[in-house]
Image (cartoon, helix red, strand yellow):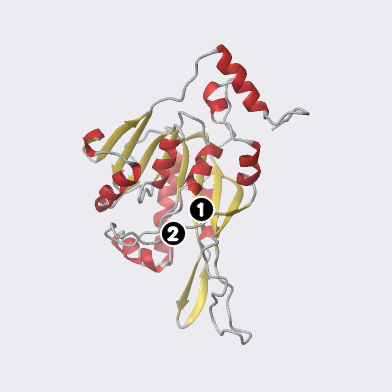
Amino acid sequence: MRQRRGTDTTFPERALSRLLRRHRVEPPPTRHRLILGDSRDMRELGDGEVQLVVTSPPYPMIEIWDELFETMGCITYRDMLNYLEEVWRECYRVLCDGGYLCINIGDALRRIDGAFRLFSNHAETIKQCEEIGFTVLPYILWKKPTNRPDAFLGSGFLPPNAYVTLDCEYILIFRKGRPRRFKPLDPYRYLSHYSKSERDVWFSQIWEVRGMRQESREAPRRLAAYPYEIPYRLVRMYSVMGDTVLDPFLGTGTTMLAAMKTHRNSVGYEIDASLLPLIWKRLGIKTRQIRVEGRVYEFTYQ
């Protein structure tokens, strides 16, 4: 963003100031839908209905997701990847031209036949999405400061059979088609601007964001949720106020919360109905605020 000499304000901030002097522009009320179902079939969404997908799917070959994959009929590593590919194809369908898909995924290190091997989930996902038709963009490395610096795998202090620890995850960025176009001085786009300091941190390739505890006493099963800061940044970076954000693996509702707080609409798919109480608590939503029709739970947020 351009800066004039002698001022700290950015071009969007100055343009927004002029815009607000001429017109009364306020963030829009937003609509949020939670759908209990398998995101391989997002029949509730029309073609091109959403502008951004932000999600963290179950990672293939990570032990805490073995049971989930088994319930979906996935036994082998290839089964797990094929399951996720079906979801990415649905995401491509429901995204508008110029919409973005952001996937937080980690690689897996697992012992097979007595030896450790790497399962490169991020590379497989890039290959899948490129074949589907997405444009592959530079990815982000999320370095988790919570990992122990003295952790190691293998033979300790003796070479050559120790292994590098996996203390980074990937945030993969894809776009459908060419970049979106906007009308000059689109009010919601300018209301959605970020500051120079935000831009400098968010658009660097390495993010150091502290991870969340990987377990909830209130959850019926062990969960792995990314921290709010991750979807918050991605929603701010790749959408504008009034857009619709989709999370096909909603989990505890972190992406939906980020959309609510940034004046975006949202849709979340979650296959596990037992997570509903945890989601409503995370979102701060009372059951009386929710309209239910079939498997769709809907509420508005101002």
Is any atom of residue 94 visible in this view?
A: no
Say what secondary structure mark 2 lies in: helix
Q: Which residue position holds label 2?
A: 81
Indicate left or right for 175 with 35 as reference: right
Quarter of the figure with the N terminus: top right
**Residue 301 location, quadrant:** top left
Quarter of the figure with the C terminus: top left
Q: Residue at x 37, y 38 (%)?
A: 267
Circle number at residue 220 = none
Say if 85 sits above or below 153 in the image.
above
What amino acid is labelled 2 in the image?
A: Leu
Of 188 and 127, the residue lying toward us: 188
**Residue 55: x, y in percent?**
44, 48
**Residue 69: x, y in percent?**
34, 62
Q: Residue furthest right?
A: 5
Q: Residue furthest bottom?
A: 158
Say what secondary structure mark 1 lies in: helix
Of 93 and 37, the residue lying toward us: 37
Say if 37 sits above or below 192 in the image.
below
Q: Residue furthest top?
A: 22
Are the residues at dot 2 and dot 1 in contact (C-beta closer than 8 Å)?
A: yes
Q: Which residue position holds label 1?
A: 128
